[in-house]
Image (cartoon, rainbow, N blue to C red):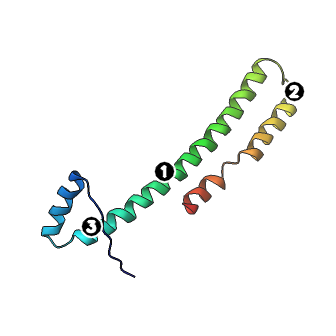
Amino acid sequence: MRGTISATLTPEAYTVYEIHAKKRAASEFISRAMVESEARENLLKALSIQRDIYRARSGAFKRLAEEIDANIYQDPKVIMKQINRIFKKHPFYGEEQSTLEEF
């Protein structure tokens, strides 16, 4: 479905609009720009979520390393249990991919 909009353009946007209006492609350009802008915004949201996931994961490993250095964990089995806990809480699959698909 096609729609007609009324918009007030910034001077910079109007300069670009005039270029495309001469080619009689301004409507197509505006439509494409709006869709691409929305896609970029969604990708930025997904990347922000992924960044937060990576920060949480790396923070958990950093804390574990500090606890190992402080001799809180010495037994390799206990250390492995803590590593598995981190992987379970912050898996390397799933959330990152789903955010890209969701947005």
Residue type at mark 1 is Leu
Rendering quarter of residue 27: bottom left
Residue indicated by mark 2: 75
Residue type at mark 3 is Phe
The residue at the point 33 percent across, 69 percent down is 31
Q: Quadrant of the C terminus?
A: bottom right
Rendering quarter of residue 87: top right
User: CA separation, marks 2 and 3?
Assistant: 63 Å
Left or right relative to 47: residue 38:
left
Left or right relative to 27: residue 66:
right
Q: Which class describes the residues within 10 Å of circle 3: few (<14), some (14-19), or many (20+)?
A: some
Eye-nearest disc, 2 or 3: 3
Percent of width and height locating residue 74 = 84, 23
The residue at the point 84 percent across, 21 percent down is 72
Residue indicated by mark 3: 29
Q: If you read the primary sequence from the N terminus, does the residue marked by circle 3 or circle 1 appear first?
A: 3
Percent of width and height locating residue 58 = 65, 35
Q: Which of 53/17 is in front? A: 17
* Circle 1/circle 2 CB separation < 8 Å: no
The residue at the point 33 percent across, 67 percent down is 32
Residue 44: mark:
1
Left or right relative to 19: residue 35:
right
User: CA separation, marks 1 and 2?
Assistant: 42 Å
Q: Secondary structure at mark 3?
A: helix
Q: Quadrant of the N terminus?
A: bottom left
Q: Secondary structure at mark 2?
A: loop
Q: If you read the primary sequence from the N terminus, does the residue marked by circle 1 or circle 2 appear first?
A: 1
